[in-house]
Amino acid sequence: MGTSKWGAPLFAPAGRRLGLLTQVALALMAVVLLGGPALARGLTIAVNSPTTTFDPSIGNSVPHQRLLTAAYETLLAIDPDTSEVIPWLATEWSVNDDKSEYTLRLREGVLFHDGTPFDAEAVKASLERTLSIGQGESYLISSLREVQVVSPYEVRLVLDSPQPEFLYALTRMFMISPTAIRERPAEWFATNEAGTGPYRLVEWVQDQRYVFEQFPEYWRGWEGPHLDSVTFRVVVEPATQRLLLESGEVDVAENIVLDDLPALELNPAITVARSSAPRPFYISFNVNRPPLDDVRVRKAIALALDYDAAIEIALAGYGSPMRGPVPVQFPGFNEDIEPQQQDLEEARRLLAEAGYPEGGFSLTFLYLEHWLFERTVGLLLQDALAGLGIELVVEGQPWATMTARMDDPEQSPDLVMFAQSTATPSALSILEPMYQTGSEHWSHFWYGNPEVDRLLAEASTEVDDVRRHGLYAQIQALIVEDQPQVFVFSQDEVVTMRSNVRGYKPQFTWSKILNLYDMYVE
Amino acid sequence: MFATLARRLTVLPLMLLGMTLITFVITHLIPADPARVAAGLNASSEQVERMREQMGLNKPLLAQYVDYLTDLLRGDWGASAVSQRPVLPDIAVALPATLELLVVVTLGFLVLGLPVGILIGSSRSKLVSALLSFLSYLGMAFPVFWLGLMLQIVFYRDLQWLPAVGRVGAQVQAPATVTGFYILDSLITGNWDALGSSLRHIVMPAACLVLARFAVTARFVAGGVQEALGSDYVRTGKAKGLSRFSILYKHALRNVLIPVNTMLGLQFGWLLGGSILIEAVFSWPGIGWYAWRSIVSLDFLPIMGVTLVFSTAFILINLVTDLLYQVLDPRISAGGSA
C-alpha cells in the first residue's frame, strides 16, 4: 500500500475514514450507472413550454392545444387541403336563411373517456360551460344565445345576430363529458381530462411530462398502424431538444432553432417537415403620429424593407411573402394583391413628395423581446431607412409591457412588430380586430377608416359567401392602399422529427400541432 | 445558540412584512395590465374588466395589500393569473427541486474547493498554485449555460454516459413525495430505480454550477490556509514536530472554515436566484424557472410568492451561517453577531 500525500498510509487505521468513504463512493457509482428500464414504443415529443392548464374551456395557446387536441375533439374540423369545414363530431348541418340558427346532426356511437355517451346534452353542457367561464377562445361563440336540444342527436344553436362564419367557431369548441362537468370541480379539469379524443391522459407530471395512451373505444377505431402512446416531454432549451432528437431519445422536436434546420436537413435520420402556414407578421404604424400620419411616408417605409432578405435571414428561408393583411390560405383572400417588393427609388420619391427628401426624423421600433428574428427584421429595416435619412431605434420588450405601451398614446412606439394568431380561417377574424376603428383588441394600433368600418359591418352580416368574399376583397384593397402596416412575411410551419415517424400532416389552423391519430412509427 | 435562534426568528416576520410591502409596491408600479394578460389575447374589454374585478385590481392599493396579507396568513398565496394554478403548491414543488440541486452543488464546492484550495494555499511550488488557480478561474470564465450545453454534447451525445434533461428518467416512476428531494425520497421509499436515475440526472447540472463557481471557495480556502501556515500556532506545531497533515487538517483548516462558511452562505443565496440558466438548459423544474416565467408575464401573485420564499431563504441562510460560526468556533459568543 502506498502512502497518501499527507503522510498517512491509505487504508491504515488513521485512514479508515478514507476507506469507508471510498467504499461508499464506489457503491454510489454502482447505483448511478445502473440503467433504467427499456423504452416503451410510442411517440415522444419534446416541447419547450409546460402546459399550465388542461382545461378545454380555458387553454388557448400552443402549449395547451397540443394536449387538448390529443384528448378532446370538436364538432367540426377544417380540411387542411381545402380549408373547408368538414364533419367531425357533428355529421351534418343546416343553417337558416339569415344565418342566425345552426342546426347540427351529431355522430352516434361516440363515447367520452369516462364512458358517457356523446349526445346533444353533451354539446349543450360543453358550450354553456365555455361561455360561462368566458376565457380562452370563448370569444368565438360570444354571440351564442341558446343551445336547444332538439333530439338526442340533434342540436340547434341560436345566435344573437347573423354570423355567416359561425361554423368556424365550432371547429375550436371542445366537447367535454357532461358527467364530468356535473360532478367535477373546476380545478379537476386543470390536470385531468374528459374528452372523446383518440388518446387518454395517463400521467401528468407538472412541468415535466404528460403521457397519453390509446383510448380503445375511440369512434374511428384502431385499424391500421397507430401510436400506442404519446408522451410530451418539457425540454426548455432548443439546443437540448436538438441533442435529444439526434440521439433518438425523442421522436419529434417542436422548437428547434431556425439556424439549426439546415444541418438537420442534411441528416438522413431526421426529417424536417415544412409547410406554408397562415402565420402573418405585421409591422404596425402609429398612424396618428407625424410623419407617419402621411400615407406616403408609410408607403416609403414599406417599400424600403428588403422582403427577400427578411425571409432569408430572419426566418432562415422558412417563410413566404405576405400579400396584404389576410393570409393567402384563407377563403376570401384577394388574389389581385401582389407581394410587396423593395423599391428604394420609389421610397425616396414618396418621401420627397411628402416633404422629407433627406428623411431627417427618428422612429422607435418595438418587437417582442425573445423573438430574435423580429429583431433581425428591425435591423434590416433600420439599415434600409438609414439610407433614406431616417433613424430607426430598435427595442425589445416583454409581452405585457409591449401591449401596455401600444395602448398608451404617450408611450406608444412608432412601429411595432407582431404576429397575428389565426384560430380559424376567417378573414373577418383578422380584419375586424385589427382594423375596425376603436377596436379594443390588442393588435389594433390607432388605425381607423370609416369606409373600412362600413365594409366590415356589412361583411359581418353578409350571408352569401360570394358577396361576403367580395367585400373582404374590397377591404383588403383599401387596407393595402392605406398602408397602416408593413406586411412582412408569413412564417412556415416547421416540425422536425425522426425519419421513421410517418403520417404527419400539417394542420394549418392548429399551429405546431400533430395529427397524432394518423401518425405511426416505422 | 438558542438565544440567537430565538431572537432571529422573532425578527423574521417583520422582515418578511417589509419585503412583501416593497415587492407589492414595485410590481404595481410597472406599467402593464395583468388582467389583460390573464384574460387572454382576444378577450373583449368586458372580459378584461371582469377579470380585473375578479383579481381585485380595482380596489385601492392599500386594500389590495391588506387582502393579500390576510390570504397569505390563511395559507392562500393566490393563483397565477396566467395558468390559474395556485401559487403555494406550485412553489412547494419547484422549491425542493432547486434546493436539492443547490445542496449537491454546495457539497460539490466543498469536495472540489477544499482540496484545490488547500493545494493552492499550501503548495510550495508557485507554478502548481498558479496553474490550479488558473484552472479554477477557467470554470468561472465560461458562461454557465454554455458550460451546460457543452457538457450535454460531451457526456450525453458523444459519450452517452449521462442523461440530458430532467430530474429523473422519462421511463422511471418519480419517487413518491416525502420531502420533494428526489434522492432522499427514493432512499426513504426504497425506490432504487428512481434513486439511480435521480443521481444520474443531477450530476451534469450540479457539475456545471460547481465548475462555474468552486473557484471562489478554493480562493477563500487558499487564502485562509496561507495565512494559517504563516501563523504562530502553526509554527508552534511545526516546532513541536507535528506532521504536515496534522497541522493542516486539524488546526489550519478549522479556522479556514469560518470564512468559507460565510462565503458558502452567500453562494447559496446567489445560486437560489442564479440557477435559472441551468434550470433552463437541463429542463430542471425549479424555482428559478418558475420565478422567470412569472416575471416575464408580470404575474403578480407568483412573483410575490417567490419573493417571499427567496427572502425567507436568505434570512434563514444567514441564520444558519451565524449559528455555524458558533459551532466552528466556540469563542464566537451568541451576542457577537446580531
Image (cartoon, coloured by chain):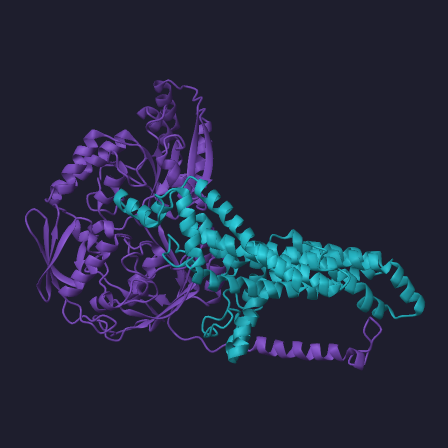
Chain colours: A purple, B cyan
The answer to whether A512 is drawn above or below residue A466 in the figure is below
Q: x and y percent of residue B26 in the render?
A: 48, 43
Q: Nearer the viewer, residue A459 or A299?
A: A459
Q: Residue at x 26, y 74 (%)?
A: A224
In the depicted view, which residue is nearer to us: B213 or B261?
B261
Residue B1, quarter of picture: bottom right
- Which of the pair B299/A429 is nearer the observer? B299
Q: Residue furthest right?
A: B239
Query: Residue B128 appears at what percent x and percent y?
Result: 80, 59
In the rendered structure, the answer to whether residue B189 lies left or right of residue A449 reads right
Q: Position of residue B202 (x, y in %)?
A: 56, 67
In the image, what residue occupies the spot 35% across and 55% down? Answer: A62
Task: Tell me: A276 left or right of A248.
Answer: left
* Image point (77%, 57%), residue name: B131
Tell me what residue is drawn at x 53 percent, y 78 percent: B188
Quarter of the rendering containing residue B205: bottom right
Q: Can the viewer see residue B235? A: yes
> How far across and down, in percent of the image, does residue A460 sit?
16, 41
Q: Residue furthest left?
A: A97
Q: Nearer the viewer, residue B162 or B217?
A: B217
| Residue A146 picture quarter | bottom left
Q: Is residue B305 left or right of residue A29?
A: left
Left or right: where A463 falls relative to A477: left
